[in-house]
Amino acid sequence: MGRDLKAGVCAAALLLALGGAAEAAGAKTSAQPWMNRKLGPDARAELVLARLSLDQQIALLHGVMPVFLGPKKPAHVQISAGYMAGVPELGIPDLTESDASLGVANAGRKDDDATPLPSGLALAATFDPKTAFAAGAMIGKQARQKGFNTLLAGGANLLRDPRNGRNFEYLGEDPLLAGVMDGASIRGIQSNHIVSTLKHFALNDQETGRMVLDAVIDEAALRESDLLAFEIALETGQPGSVMCAYNRVGGTYACENPFLLTQVLRTDWRWPGWVMSDWGAVHGAAAAKAGLDQESGQQLDKQVYFDKPLKAAVTSGEIPAARIHEMAHRYLRSLFATGVVDHPLAPGGLDTAADGRVAGRAAEQAIVLLKNGAGLLPLAKTARRIAVIGGHADVGVISGGGSSQVIPLGSKSFPKPKGAPQWGGGQVYHPSAPLAAIRALAPGAEVSFSDGADPAAAAALARSADVAVVFATQWSTEGMDIAMKLDGAQDALIDAVAAANPKTVVVLETAGPVTMPWRGRAGAIVEAWYPGSRGGEAIARVLFGEADPQGRLPVTFPTGEAQLARPVLLGSDQNIVETLTPSAAKPFEVRYAEGSDVGYRGFARSGETPLYPFGYGLSYTAFRYSGLKVTGGRTLSASFTVTNTGRRAGVDTPQLYLTAAPKRRQQRLIGWSKVALKPGESRRVTVAAPARMLADWDTAAHGWRLDGGAYRVAVGPDAATAALTGSAQVTAAKLKP
Ligand code: BGC
């Protein structure tokens, strides 16, 4: 009785409170009609703009980097990438921006915990948009909990060169894979009613000279490669904002490039959001005319261009006031469209244990088994002596540096190599030690560790063990490019260990492709990328067969630099390390003569054999494909049967490639499927190719052209293996840009 009464009282109080709130909301919407959620984002933005003077509009168009505010930094503003004051009296919140490629970046915030995802390449290796969505949703949730309503995430630059220092933030070499995965992750982030960016638009495909280089490429090739990745990500993710890049494209800086910002983004793709600059990427107020809407990190530019100079350009008539209105409109409409205005932040409630599980699942799905000689893996839990060597496996797993760096509590930092950029906290190892994880999964074994500093001692330890597991790392960071090899003397260490014990498993924690001079001598090779907050556990689970290795390479592993489109990295003669201050480097051109033949497409054309092809990855079981049926018409789809012919359950990723079109020969990934199968189980799968993936960009006609005729396809486990081939007739069509 007492309890019922209490419940009744509570319910009545709630009803009263709700009634009051509804009344208050009603009063608020009549005083602030833009708070009416039934109106569309454009209408709401216009209602706000009607209350803003030109100066107030301009104030929304440039933001600061809090760290440079010094004592002037308001107490509520956190140290993070960016901040822009809102219009509190109108209910427009501040824009609080955090870097985010792989989590809520937190360098410079003491005692701040955050959960790092595995690297972007790792995420792409899952070939699973659901995993990308979950990953995005997790970091978006943490952003809200930490007081950020904008994540500077969504890096979709194509991997054109394995030496690009930021490859670990991006999603590989294929436009369809990168676009689909990036779009899913952006959707996940924005499912938290915050903004995600899509960046760096476009062709910021190497760090060397990023502030000065001019990327030159034919328009059709650009539309079919780098821009296609952005286009697909934009359509699927609907990001509130796009961040333009540092470099020039076709002679003009990306952030003042009318072709990129107005023609492509706004006219062709009909995207309604706002373009923010990269930090220190604005070179004048005139950028506004080309389509830039907001100057970010304004202290990094030579002047704050989008304040007084922008106003002066309006006063002189150089920039119409209507353009300022449009810039502010795009900004405000994104804040309404994503839910930033309607869902104010309520920081708190971080649950890194649960969030770590999301990161751990992604890491596990991303691990690629490259070699498994004599069925060395999975390791038997009954192994008596296991030698674990190198890679700071006793400490944790390596991560990439730069603005995206996430440093969870318990991380450990080692010194950076000489000449690395100033920012960040050294080479950060996330606190998920593979050594401890291996010990936990093999409680009966004697698991010894050697740090690998002395190769002879490591080899002696390996010789005395049943199996040796060598961890090898490659550090990478924003601001500089890297060599396509393991850091330091690790190749020699692996050689020494493998010579001592043929049962040597090499676990790579690399930014991307590396050469493997010891490949023939290693028993097994596992690519674990930068595996994030639970990386150690994920690696151990795959090593012991608790999880099937189901990652597939989102990038070709070439045999060496000689197989790259540009064997010598352009600009490397200048020894440029990019900081955020204006660059002293001499401008140079990077001509992408390979056009849209990036990665595996180039290999298909040249006929050369890489170290490992795009899409490659072994399982602990085996799969067979049969019964291909290709259907044509307005687009193309392929149905086939996948059978698990082995004795373990496993997950496969059969891939569908276009190999020839009526007027063109070019290999293209046009779809894939992910199938989990029990031993002996078969499943019929259908993969449908989006029509645009079959089409060519027709520059003269300004649209996609689908030639009518026979389209040939191959189904295979990777780009270099055509297990099944077939063809179908596709009808000619013109597709909108
Ligand atoms: C990077 C961006 C980043 C920005 C803000 C720049 O150096 O290129 O990716 O979002 O800094 O930290």
Image (cartoon, rainbow, N blue to C red):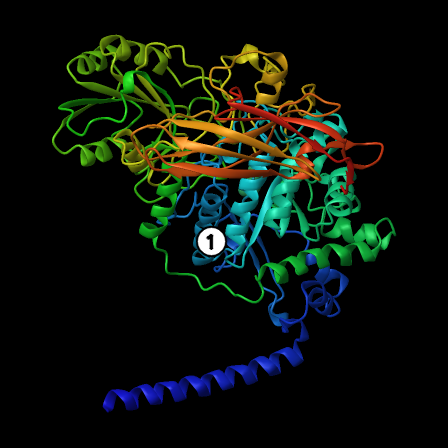
On-image quarter of the N terminus: bottom left
Closer to the camera in the image, 327 or 725: 725
Q: Residue furthest right?
A: 317
- The part of the image, by quadrant, that contains residue 384 is top left
Q: Residue at x 63, y 45 (%)?
A: 234
Q: Is residue 598 left or right of residue 551?
A: right
| Quadrant observed for ligand 1 in the rendered image | top right
Amino acid type assigned to the residue bearing label 1 in the image: Ala
Residue 87: x and y, percent? Answer: 63, 66
Q: Residue at x 61, y 43 (%)?
A: 233
Indicate the secondary structure of the residue bearing disc 1. helix
Q: Can residue 81 be seen here?
A: no
Residue 565: x and y, percent? Answer: 62, 16
Q: Which residue is mark 1?
A: 143
On-image quarter of the C terminus: top right
Closer to the camera in the image, 381 or 169: 381
Q: Is residue 373 left or right of residue 42?
A: left
Q: Residue at x 76, y 29 (%)?
A: 219
418 over 287 or under it: above or below: above
